[in-house]
Amino acid sequence: MVEESIIVVGGGIAGLTSAALLAKEGYQVTLVEAHTQLGGCAGTFQRGPYTFDVGATQVAGLEIGGIHHRLFNYLDIPIPNAKILNPGCCVVLGDGTRPINLWHDPFLWENERQKQFPGSEIFWSLCSYIHKSNWSFVERDPILPFRNFWDLSQLIRAIRPSNLLTGVLSKLTIADLLVMTGCQRDRRLRRFLDLQLKLYSQEPANRTSALYGATVLQMAQSPRGLWHLHGSMQILSDLLKNSFLRDGGKLLIGHRVTNIVNEKKSNTFNVDIVDRKKNLISMNASDVVFSLPPQSLLDLIPVNGGLSTTYRNSISKLPKPSGALVFYGALGRAELPVDCPGHIQLFDKQFGSLFISISMENDQRAPVGMATLIASIFVDIDQWSNLDSQSYSIKKDIVAKQITTIINNHFRLTENSWSHQEFSTPRSFERWTGRPRGIVGGLGQHPSQFGPFGLSSRTPLHGLWLCGDSIYPGEGTAGVSQSALMVVRQLMKNKGRHLRIPIFN
Ligand SMILES: Cc1cc2nc3c(=O)[nH]c(=O)nc-3n(C[C@H](O)[C@H](O)[C@H](O)COP(=O)(O)OP(=O)(O)OC[C@H]3O[C@@H](n4cnc5c(N)ncnc54)[C@H](O)[C@@H]3O)c2cc1C
């Protein structure tokens, strides 16, 4: 047993994963979660007979060798029951043309894209090459961005010859790849890419790093894939929690971290925590793993709390992330088309991308014969954060109506079709997840922010570590799990130990 006390702040997938790994390695870990439920953006809530996933609805990385599979295997917890999504998504460009199905089978997908975007195969071949090269790199658990010799050694260990070739593209965008391959005039292809990338990178094609974009554009295809969890997204958090508690972790749920101060003399952290009855608990730790958006550091560490002014300034200048509007509805399955895909992305002139997830029959989200339907849109948080309560509630009603109308028109539904409707805004996400102003999805994957150019998990404060969707490799439950693994490896190395999680090929 290693006698080190570590506090993990935040019980979303990033915090839970790092806490579970550290507890398994024998550290004394306290995980502090402000909400009464774990999971954060990948949590769920209940309304009568319906279970709604708060944010994340699809999971990557459950296939053999995928990050969730590797970590669950290592933690000795069962891989959750899930179905591969085929298609991973059905993209409707809104121009009257046939929807594009992201088939799981790579040959079917190749066939589909050749029919949908004739003449673009050279672009897709380049993306495929980058995609394969990147995965062989990511699977070897590189540390990015590197901040010391050990980080660099882990980066070099992960690099394969193909990465040296693709590395020259690191400052390019997906739009640059379109130009390089002569596909820049294909407007349908461009709209498709803009829509898909907005979902995974928070940015359109001309602002998404070529290396990141090429990696996520083929995430739905074998040997990777997107999965639908049986039950709800909450199962991921429940399994990680079980692992953490089994290994002796201490869980403070419904407890909010309010203050973190670095004690210079002892080089430890004093962390103030408030419970639901407003009782104050003060704890001491050698390390703090911080899984909230890094912008929250500015509120939680006072000006004299140890963080340098330069670092504080760099955090306050980070690019502004998006917020999310989410519609949660329930209806009779018979109201939906037969063979309706589970995940649909619609183009809308006003909102851009509307991402719809529909529950499967018997997946425990809705009673037999019923379905839940969740639709999300990424928006500018400034449009929502500075409103007085009256303007906010008027705006919320108007936008909810607009979004319901888009869904009703697409599926030919009426107001009477719905047995439940509810709508959340960035303010709701701020309340649920404590994320400042309801920012979600990390920093965006512009070439200036991606990988080696992003925010480091090491901070200038020895013992304060960052993970979560603002840290490499970025958003998604798979991304934040990878960031958690990275930070645990760095932290353990600092304490003279090595963590290696087996890879599966
Ligand atoms: C609408 C939407 C749709 C999405 N769809 C998908 C998808 O289909 N697939 C996918 O993989 N990803 C998806 N994502 C992204 C994914 O959900 C996130 O990237 C990921 O869940 C973030 O995990 P995290 O642990 O970094 O942060 P969070 O989930 O935000 O966790 C942070 C936790 O910290 C807690 N907390 C906050 N403040 C404090 C405090 N002061 N003290 C203690 N605890 C605190 C919060 O309550 C929360 O539980 C989606 C996100 C959104 C918003």
Image: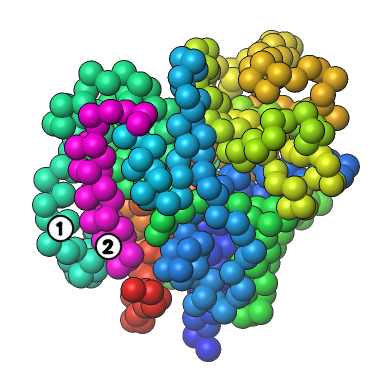
Bin the neighbour count of mark 2 within 10 Å (Cα to Cα): few under 14, some 14-19, many 20 and up.
some
Q: Where does residue 13 sit, x and y in percent of width and height?
A: 56, 56
Image position of 304 with respect to 402: above or below: below
* Residue closer to the observer: 181 or 211: 181
Q: Quadrant of the C terminus?
A: bottom left
The question of residue 347 being in magenta is answered with no
Residue 358 visible in rendering: yes
Q: Are marks 1 and 2 in contact (CB under 8 Å)?
A: yes
Which of marks 2 and 1 precedes in the sequence?
A: 2
Left or right of 210? Residue 41 is: right
Label 1 crowd (10 A; few <14 / some 14-19 / many >=20) = some
The magenta segment is 115-144
Separation of residues labelled 1 and 2 (CA atoms): 9 Å
Residue at numbered disc 2: 136
Determine whether the residue tagged by mark 2 lies in a helix, strand or loop: helix
Q: Nearer the viewer, residue 238 or 182?
A: 182
Q: Quadrant of residue 343?
A: top right
| x and y percentages locating residue 235 in the rendered image | 67, 60
The chosen color scheme is rainbow
The amino acid at mark 1 is Ser
Residue sitting at 17 percent across and 64 percent down? 160
> Which quarter of the figure has residue 487?
bottom left
